[in-house]
Amino acid sequence: MAKPLKEQAFATPDKVAELVQKVYAAIQQELLPILAKMKLYLQNPSTRTILFKPIKTNIVEAHTQVESLLKAEYSAEEQANINMISIQDLQTQLDNLL
């Protein structure tokens, strides 16, 4: 019988917490230059918003999937240690990047 996900070497709570933090850092480091280039070439804010919406939607959907997995596979204490931000906070952060 297979071990639970959180007991797999790649999915220990510490590894997941590290990955979550790397993703948040990448969002900040990678999206900011992209959005700066969008502002340079696209003067209209509504155009930038329209183009950014699918990116935002994909990020939020991936976050939702990871959050669901954490709720299903990890204890409340482990979830707290992994320290994922809420979907609302993520959406606010992404909106503030524009």
Image (cartoon, grey):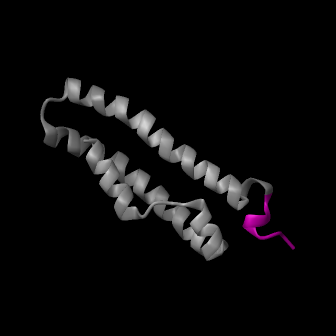
Is residue 56 shown left or right of residue 43?
A: right
Q: Is residue 2 magenta?
A: yes
Is residue 35 shown left or right of residue 41?
A: right
What segment carries the magenta color?
1-8
* Rendering coords of residue 19 (x, y %): 61, 49
Rendered image quadrant of residue 44: top left
Q: Is residue 63 magenta?
A: no
What secondary structure predominates along the stretch shown in magenta?
loop
Residue appearing at x 58%, y 73% in the figure: 71
Rendered image quadrant of residue 9: bottom right
Residue appearing at x 22%, y 45% in the figure: 50
Rendered image quadrant of residue 38: top left
* Rendering coords of residue 49 (x, y %): 21, 44
Quarter occupied by the C terminus: top left
Residue appearing at x 36%, y 46% in the figure: 55
What is the residue that sits farthest to the right in this orientation? 1
Residue appearing at x 17%, y 39% in the figure: 47
Is residue 45 shown left or right of residue 24?
A: left
Count of numbered marks: 0
Q: Nearer the viewer, residue 36 or 41?
A: 36
Quarter occupied by the N terminus: bottom right
The vertical placement of 76 against 85, above or below, is below
The vertical placement of 19 against 83, above or below, is above
The vertical placement of 67 against 62, above or below, is below
